[in-house]
Amino acid sequence: MQQTFKIPESVLVVIHTPALEVLLIRRVDDAPDGEAFWQSVTGSKDTLQEDFRATAVREVQEETGIEADAPGCILRDWWLENVYSIYPQWLHRYAPGVRENTERIFSLEVPEGTAVQLNPREHRAWQWLPWRQAALACYSPSNAEACLLLPRFAGRC
């Protein structure tokens, strides 16, 4: 059986309400230092041909049960990308020699009270936090930065 490697191109989707309450989800596997790993939706492309928007829509649905194209939802491509080193404990998921990932940032505005249904294989808890508090709770520095940029990209500045 041939091993399938993850594609080192992914999305980060900051899900939020009109009031800029941010949805954070806690990974099943905590951070290497044992700290709770709270994050926004993230995920890799399934194929090289899959565009970032399609990846964002798919990952949001898979991880939270939210339909990004549903009425009242607004998916915004920020046209920003982060390049970061892949955490050592996850390098085995990528082809030999792959050390960095390119992450495209999106936000998804959802109506207040949107239901969340986590994928239990990936996440164990969720919470809505004001955007500044969400930034403080994020384990990943790029995710924290995206939360802090949210008012500007959500048109709330």
Image: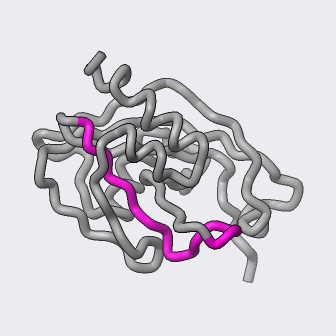
Note whether 141 is above or below 125 in the view shown: above
Q: Nearer the viewer, residue 94 or 152?
A: 152
Magenta extent: 20-34
Q: Is residue 30 shown left or right of residue 63?
A: right
Residue 77 x, y percent position in the rendering? 41, 29
The residue under the point 18% across, 35% down is 18
The residue under the point 59% across, 49% down is 140
Residue 22 x, y percent position in the rendering? 31, 46
Locate the N terminus by quadrant: bottom right
Note whether 48 is above or below 115 in the view shown: above
**In which quarter of the view is residue 21 placed?**
top left
The extreme top residue here reads 157
Q: Is residue 117 shown left or right of residue 36?
A: left
Note whether 150 is above or below 118 in the view shown: above
Residue 115 x, y percent position in the rendering? 17, 61
The residue under the point 75% across, 68% down is 89
**In which quarter of the view is residue 128 placed?**
bottom left
Q: Is residue 25 magenta?
A: yes
Residue 135 x, y percent position in the rendering? 45, 43
